[in-house]
Image (cartoon, rainbow, N blue to C red):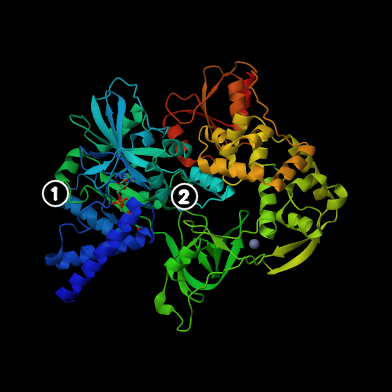
Amino acid sequence: MTSQDALQEIESLSEKINYHNHLYYQESRSEISDYDFDQLLNRLIELEIEFPEHKKEDSPTQRVGGTITKSFDSVTHKYRMLSLGNTYSKEELIDWDKRVAKGLETDDYEYFCELKFDGVALSLTYENGLLKRAVTRGDGVQGDDITANAKTIRTIPLRLQKDNIPAAFEVRGEAFFPKNEFNRVNQEREDIGEERLANPRNAASGTLKMQDSSIVASRKLDCYLYYLLGENLSYDSHESSIAQIEEWGFNVSPTYRRCQNIQEVLDYISDWEEKRHDLPSETDGVVIKVNNLKQQEALGFTAKSPRWAISYKYKAESASTTLESISYQVGRTGSVTPVANLKPVLLAGTTVKRASLHNANEIERLEIRIGDTVNVEKGGEIIPKITSVDFSQRDLFSVPVEYITHCPECQTELVRIEGEANHYCPNVESCPPQIQGRIEHFIQRKAMNIDSLGTETIRGLLDKGLIQNYADLYNLTFEDLNGLEFKTFSEKKGEYSLRSLREKSATNIIKAIDASRSIPFEKVLFALGIRYVGQTVAEKLATHYKNIDALADADLESLINVPEIGDRIAQSVIEFFAEEKNQLLVNQLKSAKVQFELIETEIISEGSSLSDKTFVISGVFNQFSRDELKDKIKANGGKVVSSISAKLDFLVAGDKMGPAKLEKATKLDVKIISETEFLNLLES
Ligand SMILES: NC(=O)c1ccc[n+]([C@@H]2O[C@H](COP(=O)([O-])OP(=O)(O)OC[C@H]3O[C@@H](n4cnc5c(N)ncnc54)[C@H](O)[C@@H]3O)[C@@H](O)[C@H]2O)c1
Ligand SMILES: [Zn+2]
């Protein structure tokens, strides 16, 4: 390679990396995988080593990726917040270990391994035991002051109540979107017709940069701490400082391990490779730190990262296959989602046949064509995604994808709202999947809980003309259902066959419809399917207005004054009740005697056998739902708390409890009891 070629490649790589850095840190988005990003960066490092004359001072290899934004006050870090060197290869890790040994001129050192949590780095400053400031990493020198947003994270202590707290210190950690919370938020967004958030990391970063802290609070972010800094602290190892912050009440993930040598580090890496998927947070690798603080100091820093630490990143599994066709799905709100039909391929133990393409922009961005060879990846997400197209394999005669212009289900011309990525079918009234989608939304477990009525049965009922909307369900009789014919699709045979509903199923459905008459008002309100009214919003509206008539009569001003109800939701509620056909639906449901009024429940005391005892509940239980279990504890004088500490009396463990909780409770010697043991406590 000539020096001139190198210069050209260096410039083009720098430009690409700066572009992706900007998207990642400023806009909380990514267009390429982390692995591909790191390949670009590594190539640039390589070239700069070979052609040092072309290395620029502001090269992305010399700087921490982020910058500060204008929307928050910027704060200069007392100690710079650096990045971490990273590698995907065990050989490179072993090389790094050799450099550590060489740098320290001894074999006498230990490592401390932690998981690499995939979120946003936060620096928290405490003065006299009080949280003073929470700042993002920014460009490493200055960051954004996001204290108000960080305060909504419930595991970040606002005040420390131990007596051995230094007057001033800083802790650093990673704020992240717990997986189940991420899924909950996305489910809720889907329920109300909003786009899904792309991945937990980007969502956490986007959330912490929001101007409205109440939205931040509604997304229950969490934070793990992994670093203590300050003047005159008397710890000699990273491990002892971590033990200290844990004792002060900071949330430390119990997944760390001290390792005597690089072999033990490699063992730790393999131990967590699979297990990490069961943890509450996304992780993308392992961070390996030299444990002794004096030795850390001796090793020091490069311009961008410490020499005493490195991250080993797990590579997402990927596979190559062919895009056979694209089909288009129409959802309850009319939004159209393109789906890639792939030649079946084995990926991370499952056969993948489909991948979401999200919207027209994504198709354009990937420049994907039918017949292309594509790479699919399965990250933390359940749905696999296409990460890139192998252009070298492209058929000469292939043509760009033409996005559909008309609804594949009802042939109505699609519309695209300014500023939104999705296309919509505007035929709300009679587009079949929209009608069906509204009924499916109504009957789901979280709503009217009539889910014994499956998708296919609903189709059958619609086809027969027995129902036209969800309110019609209440007119169904056993005779309508018994023997009802419906089509069912067999994946195996790849074809539809005709079946008929059995007597027992018909009975169950009638029972479930009947039982839904006692489903509480807030759930009924959610079931109606008003755009932007998800479960939480429905609860807020129900609590505020107490009954459907008051809500239907509310004007814009009144609605906006309800805490946490914004313009968009208010407008949507008004539009819903203004439509005559919706008024008819509501009236029909009223005649069917569903709950349109709030019943305020009180917890009735059952005794005091649990008084002064604290409980954490985790997992799934046989006899109770989690809420019922909580009520039971409260009814008997106990207290339910959310995090495990040494002071906790009992951890009630159900099935599928997270391994991290278990490990933490075991470590802190908290008493772990089963559901049955819990019931015994009540009787004693
Ligand atoms: N896909 C893209 O477009 C794109 C763009 C830019 C950056 N990236 C990704 O971001 C990474 C670079 O980001 P970076 O500079 O923030 O470095 P990094 O994320 O690789 O490592 C540093 C960060 O790790 C985090 N961390 C998590 N657990 C930790 C622990 N236990 N101890 C210490 N730190 C811990 C901290 O936030 C710290 O700031 C790259 O690996 C790249 O893959 C991707
Ligand atoms: Zn349609």
Q: Nearer the observer, disc 2 or disc 1?
A: 2
Q: How many marks?
A: 2
**Quarter of the figure that contains the C terminus:** top right
In front of the other: 205 or 89: 205
In front of the other: 377 or 601: 601
Marks 2 and 1 sit apart, C-alpha to C-alpha, by 38 Å
Which residue, as the protein is rendered here, is positioned at the far bottom?
A: 397
Q: Which residue is mark 2?
A: 277
Instruction: Determine whether 471 is above or below 667 in the image.
Output: below
Query: What label sits on residue 105 in the rendered view?
Result: 1
Left or right: residue 300 compared with residue 72: left
Dot 1 falls on a residue whose secondary structure is loop
In front of the other: 495 or 598: 598
Q: Earlier in the sequence, mark 2 or mark 1?
A: 1
How many C-alpha atoms fall within 10 Å of the one at disc 2: few (<14), some, or many (≥20)? some
Which residue, as the protein is rendered here, is positioned at the far right?
A: 479
Look at label 2 and name its amino acid. Answer: His
The structure residue drawn at horizontal position 62% and vertical position 45%, both measured from the top left corner, is 575
Q: Kindly tell me whether residue 253 is visible in this rendering.
A: no
Res 392 quadrant in image: bottom left
Instruction: Determine whether 583 is above or below 630 in the image.
Output: below
